[in-house]
Amino acid sequence: MAKQPTEVIPTNPNTYTKKERNYFLIGLFGQNIMYNVVASCLMYYLQFTVLIPAMTVSVIFTVARIFDAINDPIMGTIVDRTRSRFGKCVPYLRIIPIPVMIISILCYVSFGFYGDGSPAMDVGLSLWAAFTYILWGVTYTIGDIPLWGVTSLMTDSEKDRNNLLTAARVVAAIGGGIVMLSMQSLALGLGGKLTESLQINAMVGEKYGFLITAAVISLIGTVTFLFAGFGVKERIKVPPKKTNFKENLSIIVHNKPYMQILISGVLGSTKTIIAIVAMTIVTYYYASKDPIMALVYMILLGGGFFLGQFAFMLVTPALNKKISKKHLYNWSNILSIVPYALIFVAYLIDPHHLNNIGWLLGCFVLFGIAGGSNGITTVLQSQMIADCVNYEEYKSGRRPDALFFSGQTFLVKLQNGLATIFCGVAYTIVHFSDTRVAEVNAFITAGGIPRLAGEYSSFMMILFLIISIPPAIGCLLTVIPTWKYALDDKEHARILAELIERRKQNAIAQETLEVVGEVEGTAEVAPVSVEVTTPTAETPEDKTEE
């Protein structure tokens, strides 16, 4: 593993201020709070509170995710074609947070419980869940793509850009982690209080608990999300050339390193199962729906994952100085196979007592190592996509910031969709769905502990199986497309240095024409762009780092 080349940094980097960086990070923090209000809790709410059958919920989520993922390149094209005095990304960031908040709350509005009324009511409940979730996904995308796309427009410096992306990933994980660790416990606790004070059915109280909690957290997320729209400045001038959707698809297909990243992410979809199932496994195996214990176990187990994730996100830039992005990405995934697989081994050894302190500490370590690998992969994925944007500008003169970062959101949605359908199939196989869920809920209300009950052992087993073996397989599949990644760090450093020089020459040419126009009394001067030709030197299409 060769030491990485020193980055070529412009003498006067056209880069963001500390205030702009902080406003962006605050906005990103809020956006991820809003994202996880729906992403981390809605599936649990629909399946285990409203009692919609597991397979129905999985189909809703999978269809919505795939539809939304396909929509991402379209939105990326729209953003890249946007021209305004604020730039191409910022206008969307000023508008979209409030609609996202409203629709997030609507996702937790339900009209009864599945199976309590007529078949028509059950169909209506399922259709409402599908409609609100699909609408949420489409609306969220309108803000998500510009938010990540603006990062490559805030600075000329690769070092500043990578530092911003690393900090962004950490802040995003913190915002999402806070909601993931606390929202369900808050909703269950509030639901219990409402049940007692209003003398209503426990499941009705739980439903209202989720609705109120979602509304409060969404409001907090909206206020902070707006900081990005009103505090960020786009500093990189966008080339005047615009492309349509068909041309953008061609750009994606012919950018080899970008395609490798996309395929790698799709093959690793099962790695996201651990986030999807975390609340269910804590609620039913560890806490038996006790809100306080649910919070404790989420902190102990989920905290291990997030602590490892944060720690390795922070050290990824330092590691990248010693190890290339390609090697760091590949080997972090390969090494994480072991901790994922050992989680299921632990369950097989002692299926009823993983809540003992010794096992908790062991699982904390395993989750921490798995989270560390995920942190490295997440940071590098953003940096490698930004590298691909620079490569495309170098090669064709187009700068598809929003389009390429729409690929990042495309991956997240497609991964979650595929992981969700996998979970739905697994739940259905062991009948952990609708009436059996209601049965387990009643068993817990009567004081039972599912992990100790033989009749529910298959439910507990499937939970541990799907958070360990499929993610381990996903880690292995992830590295297949990137094992011979086409854009090495040395080549990217050369490309960036040339791009910076091109931008300087373009700015000089524009200023010269403006001066000539003033002298000649010209009212308007057309924008000038330096002619870009496909490089004749070795490029990632004909050279692969060995």
Image (spheres, rainbow, N blue to C red):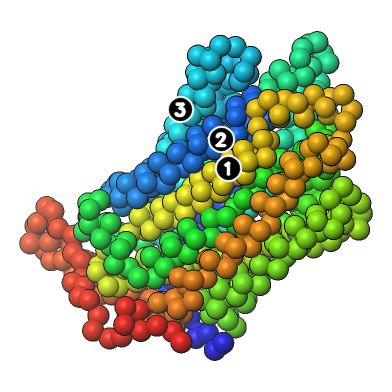
Q: Which of the 4 quarters of the picture holds residue 240?
A: bottom left
Residue drawn at 51 percent across, 52 percent down: 415
**What residue is disc 1 on?**
425
Tell me the kind of residue under disc 3. Answer: Phe
Q: State which tag comes first along the sequence, 1 or 3.
A: 3
Q: Is residue 30 visible?
A: no
Q: Quadrant of the N terminus?
A: bottom right
Residue 512 placement, left or right of 305: left
Q: Is residue 462 above or below residue 488?
A: above
Which is more toward the observer, 502 or 42? 42
Q: State which tag comes first along the sequence, 1 or 2.
A: 2
**What residue is disc 3 on?**
131
Q: State which tag comes first along the sequence, 3 or 2.
A: 2
Residue 11 placement, left or right of 87: right
Give the number of marks: 3
The local secondary structure at tag 3 comes to helix
Residue 330 placement, left or right of 94: right
Tell me the kind of residue under disc 2. Answer: Met
User: In 3D space, how far apart are the residues under numbered discs 3 and 2 (Cα atoms)?
Assistant: 17 Å
The local secondary structure at tag 1 comes to helix
* Label 3: few (<14), some (14–19) or many (≥20) C-alpha neighbours in 10 Å: some
Residue 412, given in percent of the width and then of the height, sits at 50, 51
Which is more toward the observer, 7 or 34? 34
Q: Is residue 475 above or below residue 319?
A: above
* Label 2: few (<14), some (14–19) or many (≥20) C-alpha neighbours in 10 Å: many
Tell me the kind of residue under disc 1. Answer: Val
User: In 3D space, how far apart are the residues under numbered discs 1 and 2 (Cα atoms)?
Assistant: 7 Å
Which is more toward the observer, 123 or 97? 123
The local secondary structure at tag 2 comes to helix
Q: Which of the 4 quarters of the picture holds residue 319?
A: bottom right
The answer to whether the residue labelled 1 contacts the one labelled 2, judged by CB atoms less than 8 Å apart, is yes
Check residue 55 in the rendering and tell me which mark sits there, or answer none.
2
